[in-house]
Image (cartoon, rainbow, N blue to C red):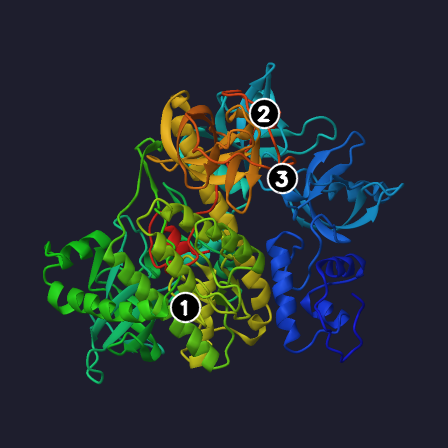
């Protein structure tokens, strides 16, 4: 499509090919604004362009932040490189930090030393593990790039993790990150580490040729323990987990908040309701009948005032934005803030004075919010209860603590929830329902068992109260024309809806083809299959059709929750987005110190992108840790048979989830039966070309554990028995890959799946607010 003249409105939007060609040819920054200007797109047509760009991003056709798009695999002229090797000439060799494995193998870029500057230059030359900002220039002959260092961004970390190995009589450090570098350990540098032990190592300088050297700094121990496995995930994903001393010093020096600019709410019987093992408590609740609205309630939510202690640009703030959020593993938490802040000064402890940001919300008898107002207060929690404890009291099983609270506090909370539930049901958020499993550890840090915790009404109560507080925060800031970092969740893309529509057609169900899709339409489908054999299958496919929730200063609403405006406000102890919302409220409402500065507003767009990335990074680390723990747990059961169900269908095989543990593994297509199997993408199934034997998403199967690779976190299964009977394919040239299966054949190592990339089971709907605190929030609370 040719460019339109300025002022002209194009008859059609540019094609994907036009957009990719423009990005490739543009000499500078390329974003939505530049593309719109180049193709003469203005006014309402920008909405269509935004949708096209979003779909291209979802499909992997473009990548990068909103203001700087590029084709996957294209390297910008200036980029950040991680130095990971020294070549035969003694020159550092690096790879781009921003590189997706789906683009192929990352290019290795030589960063030649500037020898003309002599010894002074050599002293500052980058070494292995360093990050540099480099200008890329084509190699002679046009093959590859050479990097010219513009700036050293950071030196290598003083310590890193690896596995100590004895290889051919030589001491080695094998990296925990499969992209990392192997090191040699001098005889006096092993600290008596044993073969296979996880160690912390310090990289040594001075070697220009051969493997770089490192010495063991600390022996961490058995690589199969949860501590070791979670540390591996932290290192692999580059998540900071050691607080700098300056941050710890600042936290220790913090003084309790004063009453300045605060209302005294210490007499209000607010209570906290959290998991049994919660260590910090950042929300408290209270409810009472609304005297001005028959059948209505006044609901109060108080949230820890983190903004009082973590001020813009102090050491605590710089570290918090770098981390973005806390990371939750089965046996530990890597907090966003030091314990002095998260577990002490900001934790709403029972019977202790604590500063808080609070919102008082009025709901009528139909559950519709009619008014709300924010306050900066000093509160004192009347009681710390667990979800199970509060639920038991409502069901008539009170104890010494809940007995006196039942009538004045707990019953009004449940009555208020009954009213709010009416509003929620009228709103009809997306109701995808899939079981959530929790890993329970033994005392030695290994997996003891995997359970499905019950979903209590107490969970739903806190969830709904937090959602409404988040909505109130977004509405207040928007009304004041103040900066907002929204939590947005877009509706499914056209392509994903078409795929969902095709799939539902195979079950004699349909979605309307015209107009925007609504959560209620999807809920209607889910309701029709509830308690049928297809329930899990439809919920799985529905989940995969959803977009991912992110943070943004541009509001498009939250599709999963069916809300027009939504911002995270309720968990500032463990999410930086919530802290930003607190600061904006403080500034907009004139509530004293710790508010958002005018200079900070310019950075909000970039920060929103960074904390969205940090959230995905944390989710990946949590998932990898659970995968490795389960693979370690099952390693001694190779050969055992299990029942499970198909969780994913691809051209290369089946992903299967075990029924008793929720463990995920892969069945290569080359080990399935003795037929040629064709991949029917729209139907999420593999079909035997001659026999018609069919394996479909959601099918129950019996499998044998053929291989468990704890370090990779992957399981390989073999089918026991046959698939369902179906119609043979009539196509002579089937789509996708075809394999002549040979039962129980183990593929060669090079062909095995390196990692079981299980489909995410995080829900786009639910609460998406992160109300619960404990070793690991539920997937509902983390959101998509």
Kindly identify which residue carries mark 2.
740
- Nearer to the camera, 96 or 600: 96
Kindly identify which residue carries mark 3.
735
| Quadrant of the rendered image containing residue 401 | bottom left
Foreground mark, 1 or 3, reads: 3
Q: Is residue 636 left or right of residue 301?
A: right
Foreground mark, 2 or 1, reads: 2
Give the crowd class for mark 3: few <14, some 14-19, many >=20 residues within 10 Å.
few
Q: Residue at x 50, y 40 (%)?
A: 685
Q: In this view, does 78 lie to the left or right of 232?
A: right
As drawn, 190 above or below 294: above
Labels 1 and 3: the sequence-earlier one = 1
As drawn, 191 above or below 410: above
Kindly identify which residue carries mark 1.
308
Q: Residue farthest to the right?
A: 141
Location of residue 36 in the rendering, given as x and y in whole percent from the top left corner? 71, 70
- Nearer to the camera, 630 or 520: 520
């Amino acid at each position: 499509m040719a460019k339109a003249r300025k002022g002209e409105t194009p008859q059609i939007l540019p094609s994907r090919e036009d957009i990719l060609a423009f990005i490739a040819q543009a000499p500078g920054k390329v974003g939505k604004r530049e593309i719109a200007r180049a193709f003469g797109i203005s006014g309402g047509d920008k909405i269509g362009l935004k949708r096209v760009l979003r779909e291209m991003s979802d499909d992997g056709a473009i990548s990068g932040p909103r203001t700087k798009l590029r084709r996957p695999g294209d390297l910008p002229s200036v980029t950040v490189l991680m130095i990971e090797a020294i070549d035969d000439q003694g020159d550092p060799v690096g790879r781009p930090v921003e590189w997706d494995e789906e683009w192929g193998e990352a290019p290795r870029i030589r960063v030649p030393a500037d020898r003309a500057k002599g010894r002074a230059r050599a002293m500052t030359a980058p070494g292995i593990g360093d990050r540099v900002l480099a200008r890329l220039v084509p190699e002679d002959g046009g093959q590859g790039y050479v990097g010219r260092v513009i700036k050293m961004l950071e030196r290598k970390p003083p310590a890193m993790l690896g596995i100590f190995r004895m290889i051919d009589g030589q001491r080695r450090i094998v990296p925990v990150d499969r992209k990392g570098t192997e090191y040699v350990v001098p005889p006096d540098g092993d600290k008596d580490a044993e073969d296979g032990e996880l160690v912390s190592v310090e990289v040594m300088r001075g070697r220009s040729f051969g493997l770089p050297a490192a010495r063991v700094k600390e022996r961490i121990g058995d690589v199969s323990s949860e501590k070791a496995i979670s540390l591996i995930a932290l290192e692999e994903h580059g998540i900071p987990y050691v607080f700098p001393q300056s941050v710890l010093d600042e936290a220790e020096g913090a003084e309790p908040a004063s009453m300045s600019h605060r209302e005294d709410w210490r007499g209000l019987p607010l209570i906290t309701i959290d998991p049994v093992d919660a260590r910090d408590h950042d929300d408290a609740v209270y409810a009472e009948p609304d005297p001005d609205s028959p059948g209505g309630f006044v609901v109060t939510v108080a949230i820890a005032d983190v903004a009082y202690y973590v001020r813009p640009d102090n050491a605590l703030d710089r570290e918090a934005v770098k981390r973005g959020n806390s990371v939750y593993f089965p046996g530990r938490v890597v907090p966003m803030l030091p314990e002095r802040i998260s577990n002490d000064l900001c934790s709403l402890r029972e019977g202790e004075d604590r500063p808080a940001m609070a919102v008082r919300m009025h709901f009528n008898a139909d559950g519709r919010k009619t008014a709300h107002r924010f306050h900066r207060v000093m509160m004192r929690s009347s009681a710390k209860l667990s979800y199970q404890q509060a639920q038991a009291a409502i069901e008539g099983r009170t104890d010494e603590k809940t007995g006196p609270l039942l009538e004045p506090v707990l019953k009004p909370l449940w009555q208020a929830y009954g009213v709010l539930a009416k509003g929620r049901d009228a709103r009809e958020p997306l109701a995808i329902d899939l079981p959530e499993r929790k890993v329970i550890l033994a005392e030695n840090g290994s997996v003891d068992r995997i359970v499905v915790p019950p979903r209590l009404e107490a969970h739903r109560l806190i969830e709904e109260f937090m959602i409404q507080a988040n909505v109130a925060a977004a509405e207040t800031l928007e009304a004041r024309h103040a900066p907002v970092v929204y939590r947005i969740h877009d509706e499914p893309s056209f392509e994903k809806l078409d795929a969902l529509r095709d799939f539902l057609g195979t079950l004699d169900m349909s979605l309307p083809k015209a107009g925007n899709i609504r959560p209620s339409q999807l809920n209607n489908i889910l309701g029709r299959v509830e308690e049928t054999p297809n329930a899990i299958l439809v919920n799985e496919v529905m989940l995969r059709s959803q977009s991912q929730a992110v943070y943004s200063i541009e509001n498009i609403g939250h599709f999963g929750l069916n809300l027009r405006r939504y911002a995270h406000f309720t968990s500032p102890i463990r999410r930086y987005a919530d802290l930003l919302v607190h600061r904006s409220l403080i500034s907009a409402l004139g509530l004293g110190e710790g508010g958002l500065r005018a200079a900070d507003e310019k950075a909000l767009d970039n920060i929103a992108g960074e904390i969205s990335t940090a959230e995905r990074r944390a989710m990946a680390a949590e998932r990898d840790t659970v995968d490795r723990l389960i693979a370690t747990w099952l390693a001694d059961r190779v050969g055992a048979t299990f029942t499970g169900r198909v969780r994913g269908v691809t051209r290369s095989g089946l992903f299967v989830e075990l029924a008793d543990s929720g463990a995920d593994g892969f069945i290569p297509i080359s080990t399935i039966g003795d037929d040629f199997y064709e991949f029917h993408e729209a139907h999420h199934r593999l079909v035997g070309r001659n026999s018609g034997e069919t394996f479909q998403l959601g099918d129950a199967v019996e499998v044998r554990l053929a291989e468990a690779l704890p370090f990779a976190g992957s399981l390989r299964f073999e089918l026991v028995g046959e698939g369902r009977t179906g119609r043979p394919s009539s196509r002579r040239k089937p789509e996708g890959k075809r394999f002549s299966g040979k039962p129980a054949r183990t593929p060669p190592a090079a062909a095995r799946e390196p990692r079981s990339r299980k489909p995410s089971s995080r829900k786009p709907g639910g609460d998406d607010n992160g109300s619960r605190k404990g070793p690991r929030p539920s997937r509902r609370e983390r959101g998509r």
